[in-house]
Image: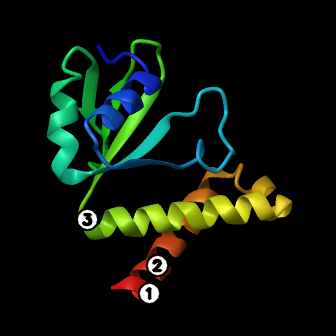
Amino acid sequence: MIGSYKDLTDRLDQFGIKYFLTGSRCWNCWTRNSDYDIGIDYDSMNNILADMRHLDAERSSYNACIKIKMLDDTEVNLIPLTKVDFEIWKLSTEYIRVMTSCYPSLRKKMGNKQFRISLFEMQRALTRMMIT
């Protein structure tokens, strides 16, 4: 039974479902109450959701992800992405992860959620322009 973030990633690995961690937990600027943001292959989404029927799940207010309340009280956002968007999000996430690990001054700014979201949106746009 899936009840925690670790259970979820173990199940994704078990089924060979492509996913990646993104957002504040990936960029090392999370707080104790931060959720986990997982980019997941859109075609695999229903397979994993069937395994989590026992959990509280709902569409986000902005309709971009499925918010899941785990049994250990953590929240996980499953972000379904098409093949192209999956690669764009993954590359953008990795770029920001590398930048924050190389530049301490950027790491401090990443604590500001609005800055973090803006930086990611700009990086996604740049990545999309480069690969499509």
* Disc 2/disc 1 C-alpha distance (Å): 5 Å
Q: Which residue is mark 3?
A: 83
Q: Which residue is mark 1?
A: 130
Q: On the image, which quarter does residue 25 sit in?
A: top right
Residue at x 77%, y 56% (from the top left corner): 107
Report if the CB atoms under discs 3 and 2 are less than 8 Å apart: no
Q: Which residue is mark 2?
A: 127
Q: How would you rate the neighbour count of disc 3 (Cα within 10 Å): few for under 14, some for 14-19, many for 20 or more? A: few
Q: Secondary structure at mark 2?
A: helix
Could you tell me residue 7's position as x and y percent?
40, 22
Q: Is residue 69 above or below residue 113?
A: above
For badge 3, the amino acid type reads Lys
Could you tell me residue 36's position as x and y percent?
49, 36
For badge 2, the amino acid type reads Thr
For marks 3 and 2 on the same chain, the one whose residue lies earlier in the sequence = 3
Q: Is residue 86 above or below residue 61?
A: below
